[in-house]
Image (cartoon, rainbow, N blue to C red):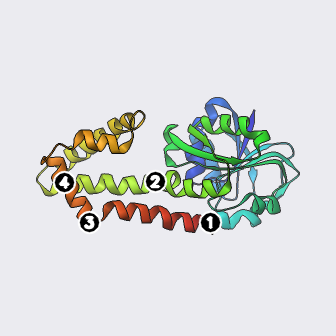
Amino acid sequence: MKLTIIGAGKMAEAIIGGALKDFEVEVVARDAKKLNALIEKYPKLKNGGVLDSPVDIENKNLLLCIKPNALESVGIYLDGEANSAISVLAGSSIDTLQKSIKAKYYVRAMPNLAACNQSSMTTLCGDKSFKDEAIKICESFGKTLWLSSEKEIDIATAVAGSGPAYLALVAEALSDGAVKEGLKRADAKALVEGLFSGFSTLLEGKHPAIIKDEVMSPGGTTAAGYSALEEGSVRDGFIKAVGKAYKRARG
């Protein structure tokens, strides 16, 4: 299968490394400088053209990696009917995609920045007739989860899409806490990196509440630290963050 990526930003770049392992990939973008930089970084990548004149998308499989507000202006230059249009545009409904880009099948996908390490948690929904193909494309840069509605993918955007920023906040705060108590900055960073790496394997087999209970012994150090988090309404803050992000994703 050939894949045409529309866009040359951070998400497009994150996806390209994995996609190239399984597909023949070309990139189409408005910024010729960014396009050339990507082609220089990934020699196997093909130049699909610059969006300053019509670009033929007839029967191609598109992966849209542009900003939502650029959809209409980009769509003007896409000539023909694509086989499929997989969109990573947060909050842009399939109905909105259909108004700007012609395709046989439409799928919404929400990867995250971990795609650059082929470790994205990508959620998808859309035309079930293209489900298997869409999953195969997105599995080239990580794990996938097919959802049954656009409402669900907007919720997932608030978790898996925005999640790396939330977890980065946690990582930074833990590291700063260790430094505050006297640990060297480099050691604090290494400690947190190891913590996150190991924790992901625990999550694969256990509910978070069980992990918490197994770590927290009565009257121990974890219980003392956890109590401080509850006093700071950390749990409530994360729940509200998901709610706010979901509302923004809905538009």
The residue that appears at 26% across and 46% down in the rendered structure is 189
Q: CA distance from mark 4 to mark 1?
A: 36 Å
Q: Earlier in the sequence, mark 2 or mark 3?
A: 2
User: In the rendered image, is residue 157 in sight?
Assistant: yes
Residue that badge 4 annotates: 225
For the residues labelled 2 and 1, say whether their Cβ atoms are less than 8 Å apart. no
Q: Furthest-front residue in view?
A: 218
For the residues labelled 2 and 4, say whether their Cβ atoms are less than 8 Å apart. no
Q: Earlier in the sequence, mark 4 or mark 3?
A: 4
Residue that badge 1 annotates: 250
Q: Position of residue 70 (x, y in %)?
A: 69, 65
Q: CA distance from mark 3 to mark 1?
A: 29 Å
Q: Position of residue 41 (x, y in %)?
A: 56, 41
Report helix, strand or loop for mark 1: helix
Residue that badge 2 annotates: 163
Q: CA distance from mark 4 to mark 3?
A: 11 Å
The residue that appears at 26% across and 66% down in the rendered structure is 232
Q: Amino acid at mark 3?
A: Gly
Q: CA distance from mark 2 to mark 4?
A: 23 Å
Report helix, strand or loop for mark 4: helix
In the rendered structure, the answer to whether residue 17 lies left or right of residue 114 reads: right
For the residues labelled 4 and 3, say whether their Cβ atoms are less than 8 Å apart. no
Q: Position of residue 250 (x, y in %)?
A: 62, 66
Q: Quadrant of the N terminus?
A: top right
Q: Quadrant of residue 138?
A: top right
Q: Earlier in the sequence, mark 2 or mark 4?
A: 2
Q: Earlier in the sequence, mark 4 or mark 1?
A: 4
Q: Amino acid at mark 4?
A: Gly
